[in-house]
Image: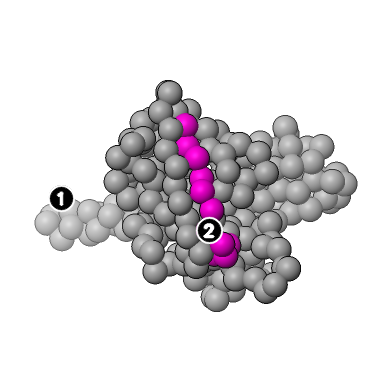
Amino acid sequence: MSFPDFRMRRLGLTAAAAIAAVAMVGTAAAQSMVVRSTGPSASKYPAGAKLKSSDKLTLVAGDRIILMQAGKTRTLSGPGTFGATGTVQASQSLGGNVTRMLAKGPTMRSRGGFSRGPGEEAPANVRAPNLWLLDYREGGTFCVLDPSVLMLWRPNMEGDTALEIESAGKKATVAIVDGANFRKWPTDVLPVQYGTDYRLSGGGLAKPVTVRFAAVENAPDTAEGSIDMLMGKGCSPQLNRLVDTMSEAEAG
């Protein structure tokens, strides 16, 4: 075999490998994942299920499935049969909320609270603007990125309130003053410990809630990676917060 023939064959193999790689990437990109599933068919399409582009979902009345593909969500409501993939255009303005939700290291300047008029109640659906803020209304497992800067958050900024936290026989009271909806977790009295229950009461809560913490060493930068991580660690409140924010960004 001459040298030119060998080089041409090698170039041909390289091109074929590149085409195959593009095809594999395209197949992976076309895959979607169920991130929320409610209704009669929830067990048929559980959260976390991966779907190929050729898959079909047959939903009945009362079903609501939220799929994620390429960093965007798509909501399907029954009854009907739907393809696993579809075109979703996201609102750029609402997409900014998703970016803020994923940002690391929330600060006191990222208020995200609700100011109300006299006699007006704070809406129940107001959510913390960042994944790493602990909305103390939400019980369950909470993923902690940096225990030293863990912040408590409330949806309104009016009035002084006191939140009591108890764990393993120790108790701390956290005062949140009028005009603020952030307050640092009392690490000096109750350090963040993983797998330990903390009982929160007062602070405007209708009833006590219990939270426990899970460690996050390296937070993903993408929505897909964040959802995978939150699912894997069972951090449902933060998962719901992110999925709801992404769903609101749907524009079609």
**Lateral position of residue 6 relative to residue 34, left or right:** left
What residue lies at 36% left-to-right and 57% top-to-bottom? Answer: 104
The reply to whether dot 2 and dot 1 touch (C-beta < 8 Å) is no
Which residue is nearer to you in this view: 109 or 58?
A: 109
Crowding near pointer 2: few (<14 within 10 Å), some, many (20+)? few
Q: Residue at x 65, y 71 (%)?
A: 116
On screen, residue 12 above or below 137: below
Does the stretch in magenta take in 161? yes
As rendered, which of 221 and 163 lies closer to the eye? Answer: 163
Question: Where in the figure is residue 86, as x and y percent of width and height?
Answer: 65, 60
Q: Kindly tell me whether residue 131 is visible in this rendering.
A: no
In the picture, the disc for residue 160 is 2
| Secondary-structure class at tag 1 | loop
Q: Is residue 6 above or below residue 190?
A: below
Q: Which circle, 2 or 1, is nearer the viewer?
A: 2
Residue 114 visible somewhere in the drawing:
yes
Whole-percent x, y for residue 97 in the image: 52, 67
Name the colouring of the figure: one colour
- Residue beneath the point at 71% across and 48% down: 65
Q: Which residues are magenta?
A: 156-166
Which mark is drawn over residue 162? none
Q: Quadrant of the C terminus?
A: bottom right
* Amino acid at dot 2: Asp
CA gap, disc 2 and disc 1: 86 Å
- Which residue corresponds to mark 1? 1
Depth check, front residue: 59 or 192: 192
Locate residue 12, reporting x and y percent: 29, 57
